[in-house]
Amino acid sequence: MEDTDDSRPSARLLIQVGRNAGWWVGLLAVNALVLAAAELALPAVLGRTLDDLLGGGAPGRWLALFVVLVVVLSLGEALEDLGTGAATARSTAWLRHTSLAHLMSVGWRTAQRFPPGDLVARLVGNTAEAGSVGPDVIRGAAALIPAVGGTIALALIDPWLCVTFLVGLPVMMALLWAFARDASELAEGYLTIQGKIAGRLVQALSGARTIAAAGTAERETKRVLGPLATLHDYGMRMWRAQARITAQDLLLLSGLEIAVLAVGGWQLSRGRISPGELLAASQYVALGAALSSVIPDLTRFIRSRAAARRVGEVLDLSAVGYGNAVLPSAGGTVEFRKVSVRVGERVILDRLNLVIPAGSLVAVVGRTGAGKSLLAGLAGRLVDPDDGVVLLDGVQLIQLTQRELRGAVGYGFERPVLIGGTLAEAISFGAETPDADEVMSAARAARADAFIRHLPAGYQTPLDEAPMSGGEMQRMGLARAFAHTGRVLILDDVAASLDTVTEHEISRALTGAMADRTRILVAHRASTAARADQVIWLDEGRVRAQAPHRELWADPDYRGLFEAGRPEPDSVPVLAALGSDSAAVR
Amino acid sequence: MTVTEARSAKETGRHRSGSDSTARTVLIASLRERKSQLWRLAAWSLLEALPALLSGILVALAVDEGFLAGRLGIGFGWLGLLAISVALGAWGTHETLSRLAAVVEPFRDDLVTGVVTGALSSSTQRGARPPSGDVARLTQQVEIVREAYAAVLIVVQQFVVVTVGALIGLVALAPAVLPLVLPPLAVALVLFTLLLQRLANQQRASILADENIAETAATVGAGLRDIAACGGQELAHASVGSHIDNARTATTAVSRLTAFATLTVAFGGWVPLILILGFGSWLLDQGATTGVLLGAATYVLQGLQPALQTLVDGLSGPGLWLMVTLRRIVETGGAGEESSDGASTAAGTDGDSAGGYDVALSGITFGYGASAAPVVRDLDLTIPQGDHLAIVGPSGAGKSTLAGLMTGLLEPRAGQVSIGGIGLLGRSARELAAQRVLIPQEAYVFAGTLHENLSYLRPDVSDADLHEAVHLLGAEALVTRLGGFAAEIDPAPLSAGERQLLTLVRAYVCAAPVVILDEATCHLDPVAEARVEHAFADRPGTLIVIAHRMSSAARAQRILVLDGVSVMVGEHDDLLTRSPLYRDLVGHWKVPAQAAPPR
């Protein structure tokens, strides 16, 4: 990760987040001030009411004022709860929508910088942490007022009371902090052991098949639970430490209050303060000691800032630029002019020139790492070249609008990721939504219709209730591609994961219903290459040959390409994700 | 009703019915088990209640008899007594918390054991689906339950202790005050109880919305390539967006209900004090002194009010987390059914197959799910003992399924699988393990000593046998690098190929005669793979290899080509002529209308 100056951008984002909570933030701020004032006034008014009472008068103005303050305080606290929740919810939703929308506009290759799990954590978890910043700041700042004001009010009642409090408070806080620090070491130890058990369980689950075959589930359970006894010990020690801390906290706080009571009682006996003021004083001590609640607010704010920085990193990714050109009405010629692509130090494609005639079926072959998947990605602008241009019917891909581009080029991956609520939605997923008939005919052409109809709810089966084999997934992806394809269709070799019969039927669809489109196939099998009009042989970053399969078959190097059987996964992750070994879906 | 609405409705319905009562049963059962600890806790609570009981009285005495009467010493004396009662109360708190540990820790132990047992047994049973990510999070959720459980116990205990103590103290101090204090408190508690159920429902909805966001966001995150290729950015955004909005609504609803809860606390906490002050002159007429009024105010302000606040905070926070998380644990992992390990109920077959170890499949039909199209249909196959068979075919075709059927991990819809003439059905996993071993692609290496990993399938293996296996499979360099058999190893820094090599050594030394490698050499380079397969072929017994590279097929005695549901078995040259798919797999191609140069 780059070392950015993270303080200012995250602060800016936090301010934006706060502003987006709308008028709640202003309301909460005003409410917080009113609450603080009421909290400060309440003990004094309580004292006066008591003195009033003891003085023999009927409950009068002071009692009425006391009731009003209590009502204000209660309503204010309720409003604080409501406002905090509503403001946080609104900010969080805004932040999530914004970062998600931005992620959608970012190039796929750029987004690869963050692994998928990390992206989700930022979009879901970090946004929630950053979203509570507005109410947190208000509450934290406002909490200082009663604490400081309470101390001042104590002084106003009697300076000796304030002195007692101020002498005792730092001692109390220092001791509290020391106790908490001792406990945190135990907590760390506990978490480490708990993490060990969690890690062992995850490990064992990853080997579920081995364990099932070996019949060692019981042994594995014992092994995973091995650290449990130690965990129990740590837990007991943590509780004992907690018990000690709680008892000590209680002693210290009560001690402080009793000390103030004692001094107050002394002043009471001298007639310096009234009974009501004594009552008020004990309340002000409680207010002053509540200063310690600032600490959790502070830690939450620090977390919010860190979370905002992480979300900001997603928002800083550069969006893909589109032009506003449109394509001529018919065509399908794909042209590469001096296209170069580098991944890190490696030059994968080196000033490649290529013309794919409209309506032709071409197979792209080459050794692993030759750039077949990259070529397929470039042809449909999943990847932008570092140098050179890719044109479709004479128009540069980067100048097309997004709608025009996606309407013209379709992809069928070997391991597609299906998105949508139902199977029908998964097939119609895209910029334009085809209607039900088009969906069904696309599914039929992709030989997915049969197994879809086998399911109880058919096309309306929810996606997560329809477990599919690798071949069925690929056919769903093909159906999706067929339902949206304009003039260019780019496919992974279907032969690799389908049985012969199905593969032949899909090939028939490719050469039949789809015949007027340009079809680019990444081929691994000789039979696939044989069916193509032309084979594009990639080698050393260039097109080594572009000719029909039977002509190339004479070359022993060419024959050697097909002996491998199963393609080896590419060692470069971006390319592997482009091609047939997308780790995400496995 | 959209599909998502229907799904969430079904889910909330499921939540309410079964797992609700199970979660409650688990909690009640755990409390009943620790009855003796709870009694001890109650006893120490009496000591803890001391300051709550005495504070008001002692303050009243200090003020009346001491400070207001000008007798400073007596005033300080009563306050000193208060300090002592506080110290005793703190001691009581210390002891109750320690007793609490004795209730909470065993509960956590039981829960973790149940979760781990349930997770492992459900994911290793016959026909089990691969475990979801939820299961792995269970241990974290147990921790949430542990803390919430403790918090709820503390909060409830504190509330009872302080409230009862304060009320008794009040009665002792000034019984006339009781009808002013008790009714508002009772009303507040009743209102809060009514509120709690609705709060729980909203909290559950909020958590569900959060989980849906995470799920859909994960799909989007994993599908960025497809979203870009299809141009489906708007649809993808909408799929997550609806849940984002749901979460916002749910969170706002929760805060609305929390606001009402705050109002009930305010009612129960302040109204008694207002009433005391309002009826103050009547109380004074009844004979109450300044000290009594101060004492009563102390009981309300230092006792009842904070206790009520703590109770409401505790139940609406940790209390809800406890119930919701416990319910999730019960739903996802179960509170632990004991792993059956396939205890054999059928006729006690010892597995001493006098009939050797031929693997025979007859009439096997299998499909995932009742309505799915079959992956294999009416398959008949015999693998005589000592055979070396390679299975090839397109990747989605079901080769792993075949391995699952042969090992007895999958149950066929029809037909029978037998090893050595004895059917696999009804035999315990341990019996089966004595006859066949399966090495899957995902090599399972666990944190422990290298020896533990290698002797996993045969704990009594001799060092000499291990050394021989390591040598034959070409793993010497790896073993030396790791530090020998006694060294502790961690699977994370090992490469996939190294992990596979270790599991292959493990399979080599085990006693089972039938070895099935399910693409178990896919991360080894071709030379290492060849060495491993030769070693296994020379090992006495049957070898079945699900081939990752076609070179595996060339090394085998017989080859099985799996093409959809159709199966062809033969030798290499034979299949080259009979099976076009096999030819394609091997990389042959006949130039049509021209003599093909065969290889």
Image: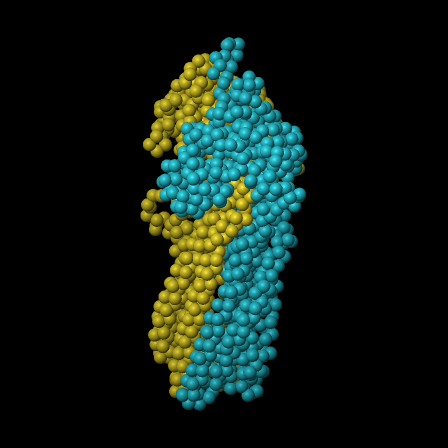
Left-right relation of B478 to A60: left
| Residue positioned 44% across, 90% down in the render | B69
What color is chain B drawn in?
cyan
| Residue positioned 48% across, 53% down in the render | A226
Percent across and percent down for residue A265 are 41, 83
Chain letter for yellow, please.
A
Is residue A185 depicted above or below B36 in this figure?
Answer: above
The answer to whether residue A415 shows anywhere in this view is no
Percent across and percent down for residue B48 are 50, 74
The answer to whether residue B174 shows anywhere in this view is yes
Residue B187: which quarter of the image? bottom right
Left-right relation of A218 to A131: right
Residue A154: which quarter of the image? bottom left
Q: Nearer the viewer, residue B554 or A392?
A: B554
Is residue A552 depicted above or below A200 in this figure?
Answer: above
Is residue A536 depicted above or below B85 in this figure?
Answer: above
Q: Nearer the viewer, residue B219 or B503?
A: B503
Q: Nearer the viewer, residue B347 or A268?
A: B347
| Residue positioned 54% across, 25% down in the render | B559
| Residue positioned 53% across, 75% down in the render | B46
